[in-house]
Image: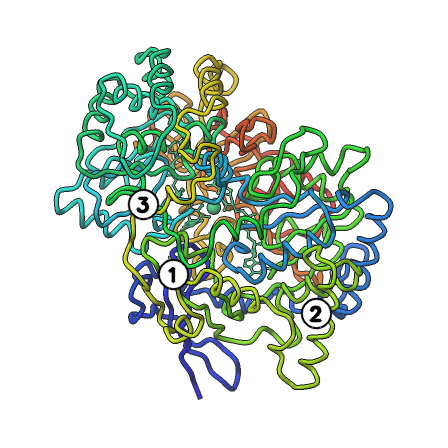
């Protein structure tokens, strides 16, 4: 017997509606197709969704807790795992305090509310402030800007594509990444193209002629990391020529401050810093200001830079002074179906925590992964000795993976919770099985705020997890119980868990045991916009309203309840950025940028047989003129060096890169280990993030400059001495094993 389950894909924020065909007897996924009855999200459906089951059925999948014994792992029961981990974490806390336990949660956790909520509950139980997360690699500056401008770190503004006549896309390639980041615009790029055919203008700002740039009406090949200067030029022209027309539904503070501020800068100098001619920028500014409807959208191309926060701020400023925020065709606040103020209270950390060594505060509750290695290796009170790593692979996805790998090896206890053992988990003392999203049900109240239209879709589970595998949230609760520390840090919660579990067992009704649905139902009820039973009555997803404009003003939480256009800290940082010396020099004359690839999701999925294509994408893209000067031909092996590391890649020559810049996609360079130790690990390409410093950071968000690393490129006539071949034994020589080079 087969059944078809309506659910949605939880790999990227496009969250495509799916029909999953399942063999009920064998619990096997037979097919994954887009759910064409979904009113909203299925049109982006791609091969990653189609082949999603390859991860669930991966031969190296971890299906039972595994304990490290010497240089291999042996299976253990959950009881053994929780008892041992709890005892060791408690010993660390008793000796060194709760901050001696650190944590990292990666991108895929963001797709499950259940696990995110219980993860927070576990960290609150432990009481640690040393929480690190993936947002510090890509999105923290958006949180910093939201806090300064709107008084609320979680405010995210969604592009209103269907009503827009002028699109200014900075640092994003929606044709590849599906128009999603901290917003979801289903089929967004296709709808932009429809608008373009109907007369809308599309401008793309990108040092690379990306797929999106190729189709745009205008492409500005900005200098990597120069977006803030470009956006400041636009704001300057608009304010000096008095072309601004802020909207009346959103009160602003600081317009005249901003006008005075832009007068401090020389337009020619800004144009040089942006790498785009002054007249081109002035013309763009005037057209943007004059367009009846317009939006400026910035993504990771802007944020993953040393001045990413001021870039993000200036993009909001541009939108605000031209009345594009919370108005048709601009960027809108979607209130979703939960009370965002309440959510803030639930998930914001109880107390502000600062990192021990660099003294930085948390952002959206977390510290920057760039700071983690030193926090592990530097002795002193508060030094991290135990660590929980869930849903992440920061040795590959974060900066300076070498430093992080070294540090992780130094821990007294490393627990990794994942589907397979990847690069970041290789020093783990315990491997705890993860569940695949096909195996979980969920409702994500926070995703509702990221939707272009008021939308909800209940995530059904299609198949059961492998026998005995617990959902991660349950493991987190078990661990809090075993540590005898109250989940969520709230007295009495553990008693409720125990009592409700007893009741569930007695009655044979598992849902009576405390579980995330309790919180989900509560949030829906308090939000008072839609009802739980109506959500469940729409298995294909539900558009429950039309876009509304003007809700942002009501949730402004700044002191004067107005949007702050010109926060002093941002003004000062901009002045310093203008005066800063160039990043490149004689030793490292080229700027290395990054991009993502269609076939992978950050550092995972490129292992899927249906998607694995290193020869096409794990390359260094160079402009032919730069290559000629270096004697490099298409396909040559080149060595790329930075102040932080060196790697080898095959050169791919074309004219898509701005001269002086090179590009290597991220996500490659992770191995998958066989925890049983019988098969050698499989290696998937070269990790370009080994070149990225973990000290050159955006000062507000501590985001590394993944998109503007100064490098040199030379022909690799000899191979790196520690070059690693594709198949290798489990080596403890970290230098050779992390620095994996593509075969
Ligand atoms: N140079 C450069 N670096 C980048 C970027 C870039 O553009 N350029 N992009 C950055 C961005 S935007 C991001 S979001 C980060 C991502 O950084 P991370 O989130 O740290 O890394 P991922 O590569 O997403 O690794 C996700 C891990 O989660 C595991 N996983 C997947 N699903 C599940 C599950 O259901 N349960 C469990 N337990 N585990 C699961 C996968 O097996 C994988 O090991 O990378 C960043 N790094
Ligand atoms: N297929 C696929 N889709 C994904 C992901 C994936 O890994 N694979 N990841 C998902 C995630 S986690 C995220 S956060 C989103 C991100 O979504 P986007 O931010 O839209 O990501 P990209 O498609 O990498 O587009 C970034 C663009 O910035 C350009 N760029 C690099 N440096 C600079 C710079 O200094 N300035 C400017 N202006 N541009 C620059 C790059 O050339 C690239 O074209 O995508 C999501 N979608
Ligand atoms: S990975 Fe592909 S199928 Fe899955 S949500 Fe993203 S675009 Fe849709
Ligand atoms: Mo991301």
Foreground label between 3 and 1: 3
Q: Name the colour scheme.
A: rainbow
The residue sitting at 72% across, 42% down in the picture is 733
Where does the N terminus fall, quadrant-wise? bottom left
User: Closer to the N terminus: mark 3 or mark 1?
Assistant: 1
Q: Is residue 46 above or below residue 597?
A: below
Q: Residue furthest bottom?
A: 1
Instruction: Describe residue 505's horizontal placement relative to residue 382 as left or right.
Output: left
Q: Give residue 82's mark.
A: none
Q: Residue 112: horizontal and vertical position, in percent? A: 52, 60
Q: Residues within 10 Å of mark 2 (few under 14, many from 20)?
A: many
Eye-nearest disc, 2 or 3: 3
Q: Residues within 10 Å of mark 1 (few under 14, many from 20)?
A: some
Look at the numbered disc 3 and give the secondary structure of its residue: loop
Q: Looking at the image, tell me whether mark 2 or mark 3 is earlier in sequence order.
A: 2
The residue sitting at the front extreme is 560
Q: CA distance from mark 3 to mark 1?
A: 38 Å
The first of marks 1 and 2 along the sequence is 1
- Give the side of residue 504 with respect to residue 711, left or right: right
Horizontal and vertical percent for residue 99?
A: 75, 43
Residue 155, by quadrant, is top left
Image coordinates for residue 283, horizontal then vertical, percent? 20, 23
Quick check: can you spot residue 726?
no
**Residue carrying label 1:** 47
As drawn, the residue found furthest toward the left would be 198
Specify whether 281 is left or right of 573: left
Ligand 3 contact, mark 1 (Cβ < 8 Å): yes
Q: Which mark is residue 497?
A: 2
Label 2 sits on a secondary structure element that is helix
Question: Quick one: 311 or 117, which is closer to the camera?
Answer: 117
Q: Are marks 2 and 3 in contact (CB under 8 Å)?
A: no
Residue identifier under label 3: 550
């Amino acid at each position: 017997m087969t059944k078809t389950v309506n659910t949605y894909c939880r790999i990227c924020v496009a969250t495509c509606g799916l029909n999953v065909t399942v063999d009920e007897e064998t619990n096997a996924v037979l097919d994954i197709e887009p759910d064409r009855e979904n009113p909203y999200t299925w049109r982006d459906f791609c091969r990653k969704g189609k082949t999603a089951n390859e991860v669930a059925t991966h031969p190296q999948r971890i299906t039972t807790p595994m304990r490290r014994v010497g240089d291999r792992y042996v299976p253990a029961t959950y009881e053994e795992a929780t008892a041992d981990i709890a005892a060791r974490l408690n010993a660390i806390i008793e000796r060194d305090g709760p901050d001696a336990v650190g944590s990292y949660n990666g991108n895929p956790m963001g797709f499950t509310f259940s696990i995110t909520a219980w993860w927070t509950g576990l960290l609150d139980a432990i009481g640690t402030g040393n929480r690190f997360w993936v947002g510090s690699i890509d999105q923290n500056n958006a949180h910093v800007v939201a806090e300064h401008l709107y008084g609320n770190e979680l405010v995210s503004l969604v592009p209103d594509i269907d009503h827009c006549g002028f699109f200014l896309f900075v640092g994003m390639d929606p044709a590849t990444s599906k128009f999603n980041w901290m917003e979801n615009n289903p089929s967004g790029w296709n709808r932009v193209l429809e608008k373009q055919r109907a007369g809308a203008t599309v401008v793309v700002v990108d040092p690379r002629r990306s797929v999106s740039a190729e189709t745009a009406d205008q492409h500005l090949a900005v200098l990597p990391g120069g977006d803030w200067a470009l956006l400041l030029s636009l704001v300057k022209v608009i304010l000096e020529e008095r072309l601004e027309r802020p909207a009346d539904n959103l009160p602003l503070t600081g317009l005249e401050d901003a006008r005075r501020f832009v007068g401090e800068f020389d337009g020619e100098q800004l144009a040089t810093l942006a790498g785009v001619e002054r007249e081109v920028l002035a013309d763009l500014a005037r057209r943007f200001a004059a367009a009846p409807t317009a939006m400026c959208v910035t993504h990771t191309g802007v944020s993953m830079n040393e001045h990413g926060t001021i870039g993000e701020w200036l993009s909001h400023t541009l939108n605000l002074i031209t009345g594009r925020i919370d108005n048709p065709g601009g960027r809108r606040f979607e209130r979703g179906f939960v009370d965002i103020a309440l959510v803030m209270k639930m998930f914001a950390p109880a107390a502000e925590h600062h990192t021990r060594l660099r003294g930085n505060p948390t952002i959206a509750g977390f510290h920057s992964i760039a700071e983690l290695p030193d926090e592990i290796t530097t002795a002193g009170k508060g030094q991290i000795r135990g660590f929980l790593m869930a849903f992440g692979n920061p040795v590959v996805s974060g900066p300076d993976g070498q430093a992080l790998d070294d540090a992780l090896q130094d821990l007294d206890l490393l627990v990794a919770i994942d589907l397979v053992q990847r690069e970041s988990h290789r020093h783990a003392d315990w491997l705890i099985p993860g569940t695949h999203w096909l195996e979980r049900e969920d409702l994500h109240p926070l995703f509702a705020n990221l939707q272009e239209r008021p939308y909800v879709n209940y995530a059904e589970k299609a198949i059961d997890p492998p026998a005995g595998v617990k959902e991660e949230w349950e493991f987190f609760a078990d661990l809090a119980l075993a540590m005898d520390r109250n989940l969520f840090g709230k007295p009495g919660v553990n008693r409720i868990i125990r009592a409700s579990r007893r009741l569930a067992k007695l009655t044979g009704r598992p849902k009576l045991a405390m579980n995330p649905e309790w919180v989900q139902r509560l949030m829906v009820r308090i939000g008072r916009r839609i009802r739980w039973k109506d959500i469940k009555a729409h298995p294909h997803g539900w558009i429950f309203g039309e876009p509304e404009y003007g809700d942002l003003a009501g949730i402004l939480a700044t002191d004067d309840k107005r949007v702050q256009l010109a926060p002093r800290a941002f003004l000062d940082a901009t002045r310093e950025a203008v005066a800063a010396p160039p990043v490149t020099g004689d030793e490292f004359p080229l700027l290395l940028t990054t991009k993502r690839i269609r076939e992978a999701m950050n550092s995972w999925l490129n292992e899927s047989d249906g998607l694995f294509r290193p020869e096409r994408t794990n390359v260094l893209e160079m402009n032919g003129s730069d290559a000629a000067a270096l004697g490099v031909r298409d396909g040559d092996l080149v060595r790329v060096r930075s102040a932080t590391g060196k790697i080898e890649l095959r050169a791919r020559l074309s004219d898509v890169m701005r001269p002086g810049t090179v590009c290597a996609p991220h996500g490659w360079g992770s191995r998958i280990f066989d925890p049983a130790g019988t098969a050698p690990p499989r290696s998937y390409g070269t990790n370009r993030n080994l070149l990225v410093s973990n000290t050159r950071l955006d000062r507000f968000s501590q985001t590394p400059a993944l998109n503007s690393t100064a490098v040199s490129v030379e022909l690799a006539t000899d191979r790196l001495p520690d070059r690693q071949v594709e198949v290798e034994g489990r080596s403890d020589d970290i230098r050779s094993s992390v620095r994996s080079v593509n075969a």
